[in-house]
C-alpha cells in the first residue's frame, strides 16, 4: 500500500509565504536556491536522513506557483514512478511531469487524476542522478 509522504505549497512570493508559515506554525523553512525550492520541516526529523522521527508524520516544501502546479499538492510514495504513471494513465489520469531526479535523494513526478486534481509521486533512491 502506498502512503502520503510529503506535501507542497505553491506560492506567488516564496519569501512572503515563508514569513507567513514560519510565523503561523513555527515551521523550519530551509531555502535551496539552486532548486528554487523551500524545504518545510513541520515535525522533528533525524538530522542525518531528514526523515520524520514519528511514524506517519510528514514534511513538505514550497515552490513558485505555475499554471499546472497552482494548488497544494500531496505526494504519494510508490515503488516505481514510471509504473505508477502507466497505471494512472490507463485509469484515465494524465502525466503532468514525468519522473525527475533529485540527485542523491530520489525521484518525483506529478499527475492529474480523473477529477482534475494534481498529486505528486515519490520514490526514494539515494543513487538518483
Image (tube, rainbow, N blue to C red):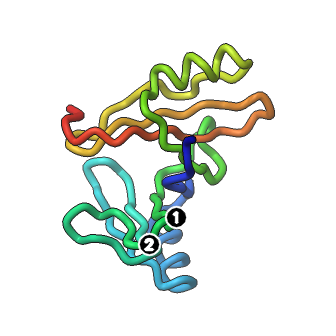
Q: Residues within 10 Å of mark 1 (few under 14, many from 20)?
A: few
Check residue 56 in the rendering and tell me which mark sits there, or answer none: 1
- Residue furthest out toward the right: 115
| Residue 52 appears left or right of 70 | left
Q: Residue at x 28, y 70 (%)?
A: 46
The quadrant holding residue 24 is bottom right
Per the image, label 1 sits on a secondary structure element best described as loop
Measured as percent of width and height from the top left, residue 84 is found at 53, 25
Measured as percent of width and height from the top left, residue 34 is found at 25, 49
Check residue 54 in the rendering and tell me which mark sits there, or answer none: 2
Measured as percent of width and height from the top left, residue 17 is found at 52, 69
Determine whether 4 is above or below 40 in the image: above
The number of numbered discs placed on residues in the rendered structure image is: 2
- Camera-side residue of 38 and 75: 75
| Residue 88 appears left or right of 37 | right
Q: Are marks 2 and 1 in contact (CB under 8 Å)?
A: yes
Question: Which quarter shows the C terminus?
Answer: top left
Amino acid at each position: 500500500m502506498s502512503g502520503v509522504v510529503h506535501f507542497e505549497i505553491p506560492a506567488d512570493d516564496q519569501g512572503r509565504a515563508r514569513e507567513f508559515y514560519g510565523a503561523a506554525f513555527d515551521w523550519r523553512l530551509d531555502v535551496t536556491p539552486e532548486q528554487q525550492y523551500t524545504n518545510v520541516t513541520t515535525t522533528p526529523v533525524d538530522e542525518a536522513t531528514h526523515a520524520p522521527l514519528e511514524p506517519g508524520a510528514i514534511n513538505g516544501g514550497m515552490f513558485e506557483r505555475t499554471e499546472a502546479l497552482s494548488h497544494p499538492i500531496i505526494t504519494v510514495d510508490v515503488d516505481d514512478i514510471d509504473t505508477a504513471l502507466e497505471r494512472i494513465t490507463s485509469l484515465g489520469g494524465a502525466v503532468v511531469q514525468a519522473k525527475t531526479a533529485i540527485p542523491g535523494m530520489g525521484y518525483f513526478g506529478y499527475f492529474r487524476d480523473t477529477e482534475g486534481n494534481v498529486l505528486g509521486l515519490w520514490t526514494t533512491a539515494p543513487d538518483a542522478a
